[in-house]
Each structure stands twice: as structure tokens, then as C-alpha cells.
Image (cartoon, grey):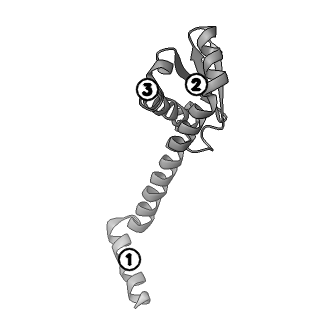
Amino acid sequence: MAYQSNDRARVLNAWRGYNVAAAEKTAADKGRVAGSIVSQVMGGLGLDRRRAEAEIGKVWNHLIDPQITAHAQPTGLNKGTLFVSVDNSVWLDEIVRYRRKEILDRLQNSFGKETIMRISFRVG
């Protein structure tokens, strides 16, 4: 049966003037290459990290105490450290001394311990 299939393909290729199977394989390979290029470009632009930061910003306002969110907002995520800007040193002291662990636990429960390993609070 395979012999007849090969003969048929050879006759059709001769009649068409080109090998359809080879053209289809090349098109499929180009599709795979394009997919890997898109993944590389997205990784190079840091879009996954930016998407995670945007998601953290949305969840922050719903998950954390409104008194804290009025004075502190996440500003970035880098290598597992979430950076949070606090509007004054009084609130910075309050958050770092009494609320850091609670905030970290809530965010880790929502995003996982691999995504947010630490929090760094700064006045800014």
C-alpha cells in the first residue's frame, strides 16, 4: 500500500510541477518557528513580568486593608521581590513592623510563593 502511495505522490508531483508534501512540511515548520520567535520576543520585552505586575496591582487593592492601600502601592516585581512605595515614613514603620507578614502571606496565597518571595517597602 505504501508503494502505491509513493507512486501516486510521485505522479501528482510531476503533474503539478512541485512537491506538495514538501511545501506543506515547510509551511508547518515556518509556523513552529514563528511561534518560538513570538515567545522569545515576549520574554525579551518582559511582557510576562509586566502582566504579573499589573495583576498584582489589581489584586492588591482588593486583598489588602484599605487603610494600607491608601498609603502604599506596589511599584514593581523583580526576581521574586515585590517593591512597594509608601507615601510617608510613619506608614512605612507601621506596615513594616506590624503588617508585613500578613501582607506577604495574603499575596503568596494568591500568587504563589515562587512569584512573591519577599516584599521591600520604601518611602517614595
Q: Residue at x 38, y 77 (%)?
A: 9
Labels 2 and 1: the sequence-earlier one? 1
Dot 1 crowding, Cα within 10 Å, few <14, some 14–19, many 20+ = some
Whether residue 124 is visible: no
Task: Specify the label residue 9 is tagged with.
Answer: 1
- Residue assigned mark 3: 61
Q: Which residue is mark 2?
A: 76
Q: Residues within 10 Å of mark 2 (few under 14, many from 20)?
A: some
Q: CA distance from mark 1 to mark 3?
A: 63 Å
Judged from the image, the secondary structure of the residue bearing numbered disc 2 is strand
In this view, 18 is above or below 51? below
Answer whether residue 86 is visible to the viewer in this image: yes
Quadrant for the N terminus, please.
Answer: bottom left
Q: Where is 113 relative to 89, above or below?
A: below
Q: Please provide percent x and percent y for residue 6.
A: 42, 82
Name the spot of residue 61 as percent of width and height, x first: 43, 26
The kind of secondary structure element at disc 1 is: helix
Q: Position of residue 80 (x, y in %)?
A: 65, 36
Residue 76 in percent (x, y) is at: 58, 25
